Amino acid sequence: MVKAHGIHHITAIAGRPQENLDFYTRTLGLRLVKKSINQDVPDTYHLFFADGEGNPGTDITFFPWPQMGEGRIGLGVWGEVSFTVPHGSLEYWERRLKAREVMVEPIQERFGERVLPFYDGHGMALSLTESDLAASAAFSPWEKSPVPADSQIRSLGSVRLTLGDPQATANFLNGSLGFENKQTDGKWQRFVLGEGAGGQRVDIRTDPDIGRGGWGVGSVHHVAFRVKGEEDQLQVWQQIREAGGRPTEVIDRFWFKSVYVREPSGALVEVATDGPGFGVDEASDTLGEKLILPPWYEGQRRNIEAALPPLEYDPANLGDDEDLEPAGSAAAAHSDRV
Ligand code: ZN
């Protein structure tokens, strides 16, 4: 069988686009690598945040729909999204997030790794996982990030899903995409692709009382898994059909080609090709700075731009750590006095 080889991108629903942009660039230090539109709802932005070059597997994207109600994690809706970060960086991150009044939970251990759970400004459940494997993900630092390169987010790590009965979804992940169920930690089962590196993990919890989830602000819209090219994509499409799934036809997203299918509990899955990639229509040093439309929307550019709210974004001025109190500075000042 052809196996997917990791998470390609994750797309979620945000509230106001300016707040979304500020959180992911100024607070998390990711790069806006593409400012585009929702290709099915062109009066909505589609904002793409990733590492310095928009490598596949580093990319979280948003449809800002502030008029929607709050999302709800549950049956049919993906849960928390984790990013990988280098070992020893969680204390930096904890200080950084708290200094910006981000809602942070205590650092905890999952599957033997340290994890810092937190929420973005629109209530989306996120976490940072310190991982050996963070070093192995394809990653390009971003020199304009307000986060120092040695602490920058390395890749998407994993995504969570809670199910009443995991069997059908397990069969889908394993039979259609090539996952294996290798590890258990308490109530959580980890399904991995390949070596289970950053982006190669889906964590599933069983809860017979789980209620139906709902799309809304702060919820994941879909999780896209990577395939190398169009041949592999067709093969995975076949595997999904043979397992009883109903995938869409191949849709050209311009930066990659996509197929969509709901896994058995209803959560939306995309299977996306690695290429051609975000550099195909703009220079890599100015990624994200102007509104990019797929060619078939160019004729409507003026109307589309007029319908979108203005966004302020200056990659040369994303703030730095001046407002962050260095660790132990209060104690140091005190010891100076005594
Ligand atoms: Zn997608």
Image (cartoon, rainbow, N blue to C red):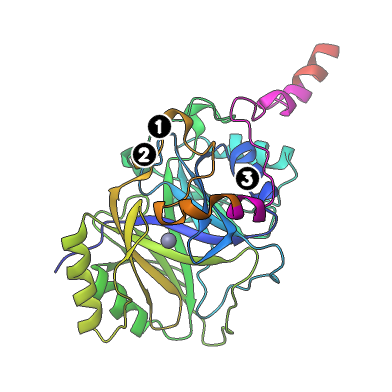
The residue carrying mark 2 has its beta carbon less than 8 Å from ligand 1: no
Q: Residue furthest front?
A: 299
Image marks 2 and 1: residues in contact by CB distance under 8 Å:
yes
Instruction: Give the quadrant of the C terminus.
Output: top right
Under circle 3, the secondary element is helix
Q: CA distance from mark 1 to mark 3?
A: 20 Å
Residue 56 in the image: above or below residue 73: above
Q: Residue furthest right?
A: 337
Q: Main secondary structure of the magenta part?
A: loop
In terms of depth relative to the viewer, which is nearer, 273 or 109?
A: 273
Quadrant position of residue 263? bottom left
The residue carrying mark 3 has its beta carbon less than 8 Å from ligand 1: no
Judge the density around disc 2: few (<14), some (14-19), many (≥20) Cα neighbours within 10 Å.
Answer: some
The three-letter amino acid code for the residue at tag 1 is Ala
The three-letter amino acid code for the residue at tag 2 is Gly
**Residue 338 seen in the figure:** no
Q: Which residue is mark 1?
A: 283
Range drawn in magenta? 303-331
Under circle 2, the secondary element is helix
The three-letter amino acid code for the residue at tag 3 is Leu
Q: Nearer the viewer, mark 1 or mark 3?
A: 1
Residue at 72% from the left image edge and 67% from the top image edge: 67
Residue at 57% from the left image edge and 87% from the top image edge: 209
Judge the density around disc 1: few (<14), some (14-19), many (≥20) Cα neighbours within 10 Å.
Answer: few
Q: Which mark is residue 279?
A: 2
Q: Which mark is residue 119?
A: none
Residue at 17% from the left image edge and 69% from the top image edge: 235
**Residue 93 seen in the figure:** yes
Task: Reply yes or no: does residue 313 show up in magenta.
Answer: yes
* Location of residue 17 in the rendering, given as x and y in whole percent from the top left corner: 66, 52
